[in-house]
């Protein structure tokens, strides 16, 4: 793995009809934001080779909407990513590190936010940037890191829907 993209699922309904958190689906805004962010990432040249996606409905739907911006990508739906901690997410990505140059993980907070902050700190990203992520890692947000041969990260971008016409201010 030379690049790791952390993508939080897009905006989801507050409660699923089943009452189970894992079944929460994306809202209309969530579907639009996921598609938008897939396009934004693709236009930035951030094409994943492998997508590791949580088994949660909202994460799977986020991937389905986002993938339209990419050429074909190998997909692994991983139940262990559902509400995983930062350590679990990183461990799963490392398990697949020799199978792809660019791995995208589509999962949930707080694990994704915690991992993004940790990697930014290890990469010596600026204090303002780290503070921004500490203060919130919104739905459909993506943090990107380059990973060197020793496994050390360097910060490679933060993509927030609001910065690209989406998010809470969107008209969709």
Image (cartoon, grey):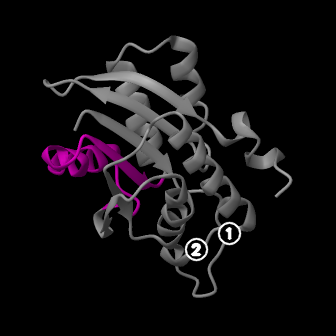
- Residue lying at 37% horizontally and 48% vertically, measured from the top left: 104
The percent coordinates of residue 59 (x first, y second) are: 49, 63
Residue tagged by mark 2?
A: 24
The percent coordinates of residue 23 (x first, y second) are: 52, 78
**Which is nearer the eye, 164 or 44?**
44
Q: Earlier in the sequence, mark 2 or mark 1?
A: 1
Is residue 7 placed above or below 159 in the rendered structure?
Answer: below
For residue 97: magenta?
A: yes
Q: Which quarter of the rendering shows the N terminus? A: top left
The percent coordinates of residue 171 (x first, y second) are: 86, 53
For residue 84: magenta?
A: yes
Question: Residue 82 occupies which quadrant of the picture?
Answer: bottom left
Q: CA distance from mark 2 to mark 1?
A: 7 Å
- Residue 38: mark in rendering: none
- Residue lying at 44% horizontally and 15% vertically, measured from the top left: 125
- Residue lying at 52% horizontally and 33% vertically, measured from the top left: 44
Q: Return the residue found at the far right.
A: 171
- Residue 14: mark in rendering: 1
- Residue lying at 18% horizontally and 44% vertically, measured from the top left: 97
Instruction: Look at the image and give the residue range highlighted in magenta.
Output: 81-108
């Amino acid at each position: 793995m030379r690049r790791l993209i952390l993508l939080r699922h897009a905006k989801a309904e507050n409660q699923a009809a089943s009452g189970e958190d894992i079944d929460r689906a994306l809202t209309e805004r969530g579907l639009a934001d996921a598609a938008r962010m897939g396009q934004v990432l693709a236009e930035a040249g951030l094409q994943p080779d492998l997508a590791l996606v949580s088994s949660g409905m909202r994460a799977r739907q986020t991937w389905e909407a986002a993938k339209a911006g990419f050429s074909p990508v190998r997909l692994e739906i991983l139940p262990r990513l559902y509400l995983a901690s930062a350590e679990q997410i990183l461990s799963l990505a490392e398990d697949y590190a020799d199978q792809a140059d660019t791995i995208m993980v589509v999962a949930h907070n707080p694990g994704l936010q915690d991992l993004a902050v940790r990697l930014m700190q290890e990469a010596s990203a600026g204090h303002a940037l780290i503070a921004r992520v500490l203060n919130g890692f919104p739905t459909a947000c993506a943090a990107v890191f380059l990973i060197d041969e020793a496994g050390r990260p360097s910060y490679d971008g933060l993509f927030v829907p609001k910065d690209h016409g989406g998010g809470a201010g969107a008209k969709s």
